Image: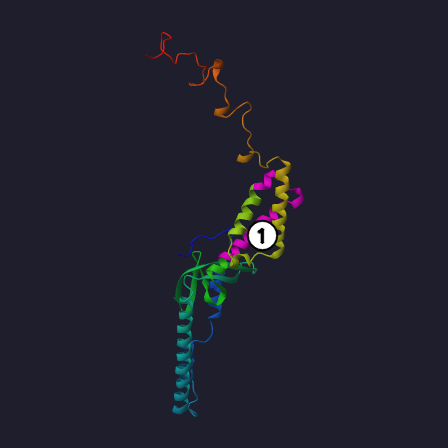
């Protein structure tokens, strides 16, 4: 629904681009219509010369022309309505003018179409615009890719020169690199080649900045970890107090009888 509020400057109401579009449409539609044609026909019959009246054949001819023009107008109105109705849900650009006469482009999605006095009006961002002011109809995929590339270029341009970046720019550069790598081929086609080269310069320069800041690999790799000093394998540890393993002692003669006598 159209807004009922309007901005005021210097005590005067400033017309919006939507209001200006509707006003221009109403001005352009003030031409000859069927009502004006009938009024002229009646006036011609009323004020004709009684000595030389208009023949019936001429009236019939004029009425036939009127009927033909009316059919053409109705066909044009039907075609315009069908064209406007097909735009519902599409993203369009409207070219209109401000109250000061400056050209302005309005972008948005067509929510619905209103048909009034033989004219179609598009509702965009809760404002009505004449169908005659329609400039461009764009595909949603194209618009999304264009907007993504546009925002990407703006963020690149906000960065300092590659030689002047520091660690405070690392997060932004990492995000831009991630965004570009996640783009599909169609989206990448909207990014200029010079912008891609500039992104690569930022990425390479950031690596140098991180190395200078000591953000390289701080943790040693697992195969580079040294063993604690003085540790030995279990089979290399000596027996405590010189003890020997069982069965390694000298023969003390106890293999014979306990009293030293041999077997009977």
Q: Nearer the viewer, residue 124 or 4?
A: 124
Secondary structure under the numbered disc 1 in the rendered image: helix
Magenta residues, dominant SS class? helix
Q: Is residue 154 left or right of residue 29?
A: right
- Return the residue at label 1: 153
Horizontal and vertical percent position of residue 87: 43, 65
Magenta residues, start to end: 144-170
CA neighbours of label 1 inside 10 A, class few (<14), some (14 to 19), many (20+): some
The image quadrant of residue 248 is top left
- Residue at 64% over, 41% down: 208
Horizontal and vertical percent position of residue 28: 49, 70
Q: Nearer the viewer, residue 15 or 17?
A: 17
Kindly tell me whether residue 163 is visible in this rendering: yes
Q: Is residue 254 above or below residue 189?
A: above
Q: Is residue 55 above or below residue 107?
A: below
Q: Quadrant of the C terminus?
A: top left
- Residue at 48% over, 15% down: 240
Q: Nearer the viewer, residue 245 or 88?
A: 245
């Amino acid at each position: 629904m159209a807004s009922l509020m309007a901005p005021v400057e210097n005590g005067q109401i400033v017309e919006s681009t939507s209001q200006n579009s509707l006003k221009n449409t109403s001005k352009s539609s003030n031409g000859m219509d069927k009502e004006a044609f009938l009024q002229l026909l009646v006036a011609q019959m009323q004020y004709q010369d009684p000595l030389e009246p208009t023949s019936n054949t001429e009236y019939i001819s004029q009425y036939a022309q009127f009927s033909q023009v009316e059919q053409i107008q109705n066909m044009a109105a039907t075609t315009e309505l069908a064209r406007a109705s097909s735009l519902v849900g599409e993203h369009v650009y409207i070219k209109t003018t401000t109250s000061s006469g400056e050209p302005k482009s309005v972008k948005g999605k067509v929510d619905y179409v209103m048909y009034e006095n033989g004219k179609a009006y598009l509702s965009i961002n809760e404002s009505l615009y004449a169908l005659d002011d329609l400039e461009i109809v764009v595909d949603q995929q194209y618009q999304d890719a264009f907007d993504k590339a546009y925002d990407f270029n703006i963020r690149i341009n906000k960065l300092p020169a590659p030689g002047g970046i520091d660690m405070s720019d690392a997060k932004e550069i990492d995000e831009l690199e991630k965004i570009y790598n996640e783009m599909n081929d169609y989206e990448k086609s909207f990014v200029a080649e010079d912008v891609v080269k500039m992104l690569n310069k930022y990425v390479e320069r950031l690596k140098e900045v991180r190395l200078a800041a000591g953000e390289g690999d701080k943790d040693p790799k697992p195969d580079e970890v040294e063993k604690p000093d003085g540790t030995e394998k279990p089979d290399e540890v000596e027996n405590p107090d010189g003890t020997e393993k069982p069965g390694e002692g000298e023969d003390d003669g106890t293999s014979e009888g306990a009293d030293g006598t041999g077997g009977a």
